[in-house]
Structure formats: C-alpha cells, structure tokens
Amino acid sequence: MATSTAPAVETAHDTFPINGTDYIELWVGNAKQSQLFYRAVLGFQLIAYRGPETGVRDRASYVLEQGKIRLVLTTPMGPEGEVADHVRLHGDGVRDMAFWVDDARDAYAKAIERGAVSVQEPTVLSDAHGSVVIAGIRTYGDTIHSIVERSDYRGPFLPGFRAAENPFHAEPAGLKYVDHCVGNVELGKMNHWVEFYSRVLGFYNLLSFDDKTISTEYSALMSKVMSNGNGRIKFPHIAVATDDIVKTVRVLKARGLEFLSIPKSYYETVLDRVGTIDEDIAPLAELGILVDRDDEGYLLQIFTKPVQDRPTLFFEIIQRKGAKSFGAGNFKALFESLEREQELRGNL
C-alpha cells in the first residue's frame, strides 16, 4: 500500500465548472521536428497549424491530437521574444494548461475576483467556423492557464489556425486522455500554490506526500495533489492514460521511445505489497511497468526518459484499475532510476 497522507475530507467548491483539459501547449526549440516525433513515436495526428504562412510572424504552432488529448507545440521564429526566452530559460516544457469551460467570461471574472493575475482578458476569436472565447490567468513560474469556451466553434482548433494535411499517419498508440499533470513549484512555495488553487479555483487537497515517507540517498519528494470537484483536473510531467498499458508500451518501445529502467528485484516482492492483479507479472517485468494499490483498486504506470537532450520534459503512461492515487509506493524506485540516469550524465 502506498504511503501518503490523506488530508481531512473537503467539500468540492469549484469556483467555476471545468469540463476538462482543452489543450496543453508546449514551448519548444524546434516544433517542426518535435511534432514529427510526437506523431511517429507517440501516435498523435497533426490536425492544425499556425505560423508565418497564416500571418503569424513570431512563432509557429502545430496542433496534435490522440483520443481526448490535444497538444500544441510552439516554437519561436527568431532569437528574441517570449517564446525564445522561455525555451532558453526552461528548455522544452509546458507553457499553458488550458481549461475547457462553458462560460469563459464568468470563469475569468470569478478567478480575478479571487486574486488571480490576468494574462488575457476574455477575447472573442472568430472565423468561418464560428467563435471561441478565450482568457488567461497566471500560475506558478512562467506557466499559465488559458480558459477556453468553444461551444460555438466547429473548426479544427482555434480561429487563426488552418487545418493541416499530411500524408504521414502513424497508428495511434492507445493514449486516451490526460490523467494528471505535475507542476514543479519554487522551493518553499508549496503551500502558497496549494492555497492559490484552493482560493482562486476552488480545488481541494486530495493527497499529500513529504520527504519523511518518500526519499532516497539523493532525492526526496514533497507533493500535494490538487483536484477540482469532478476530478478531471489534477496537479500532483504529463501523465496520459491508456486502457492497455502492456500493448501501448510495446508499441512505443518498438518505435524507439525510451523508458526508465526498473531493477528486476522490484518484481520479486511487488505482489506481496499490492496483492493480486489481473495481469501476468512477466510482461510487466519485461517492460518495466510499475504497480501500486490504494483502497479503491490498483494502477499500472511507467515513466519515459526525458524526451529531449536537455532533461526538462518526460511523460508517464498510466492505466487505472480502480485506483485514484498516483503510485506513491513506486516513487522510491522511480527516484533511484532517475538518479541512475543523472549519474550517467555526470550531474548526480
């Protein structure tokens, strides 16, 4: 059983309803090449584009889709500007986790009233496919949350983007939706941002982990999982869900995606810790898939190695069999694997 602290039960009091993740925008050094990786390896489809050819001079953006997951890869067209500055400072990483809402104006007004800092006031964007209302607020670091209302829009993504056609189509890898995202906040500011999500968005603290329960010789984890009322938005990397993790990981490995390695000794005792599971342990051990259990079931998860040379972004693949937790029982094994990678790079 995973070791964690469950805070006192809170009543959900969402500031405004959030239907789910509308999109995640990554600011990257080379979006044209990155989008080929996400398509060829992870199985995303290219659906829309915006850049110099559509009248935008300072950046180019490629919109990718698989299941209910929508990623936007944006790159600067030169060495100056906010996108270039972000990539130079942070490497490839998440700039915007956008919320899908029914009423963007109301959501924005309520967030600002509760202390959020504005990035963009509600703005109507229109083209031949209809209209979208979009606003934005700041959160930790240089990350933002766009607030998107798209009930009156039938285009490929947003006004200003054109539908993208390309003869190359890889088979989907079985990725279904965004399970959760992890935000790394400034040291000593954990409670500040927990209070922000509680006060501004009405999220509640679902789980907490600290360095007393999850640590190695070199690493420790302090984490608080924030969730909205319907559980569709959680902050505890990008974790994407699949219905068949063994099949998905086999496909991704065959396409060249690298995953963190787990010692074979992990599988000698894992069933003693988590109990009976439906899956055969042999393919899980072969592929390096981790298992954890909570009071409502169990989960299967695996973590990629960083997906670029500067190790600023990686993904988790997760399959839930009833569990609503995040694999705290596996964090020690995960940290030890990360430390082996750091040692190979000479920066442990």
Image: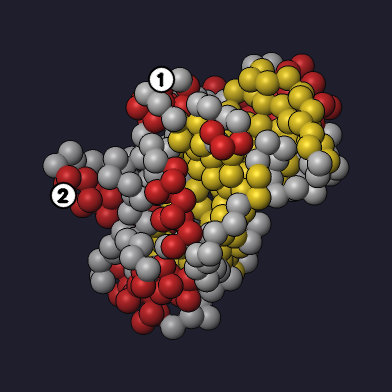
Q: Which label sits on residue 80?
A: 1
Label 1, label 2: how far apart the Cα atoms are? 33 Å
Q: Residue furthest front?
A: 53
Residue 304, position as x, y percentages in the image: 37, 56
The quarter holding residue 81 reads: top left
Q: Which label sits on residue 246?
A: none
- Identify the amino acid type marked 2: Leu
The quarter holding residue 287 reads: bottom left
Q: Residues within 10 Å of mark 1 (few under 14, many from 20)?
A: few
Residue picked out by circle 2: 344
Q: Secondary structure at mark 1?
A: loop
Q: Eyeballing the image, is 78 above or below 246? A: above
Residue 228, position as x, y percentages in the image: 70, 41
Which residue is rendered at x = 65% and y = 50% of the image? 163
Q: Eyeballing the image, is 290 above or below 151? A: below
Q: Residues within 10 Å of mark 2 (few under 14, many from 20)?
A: few
Nearest the viewer among 9 and 298 is 298
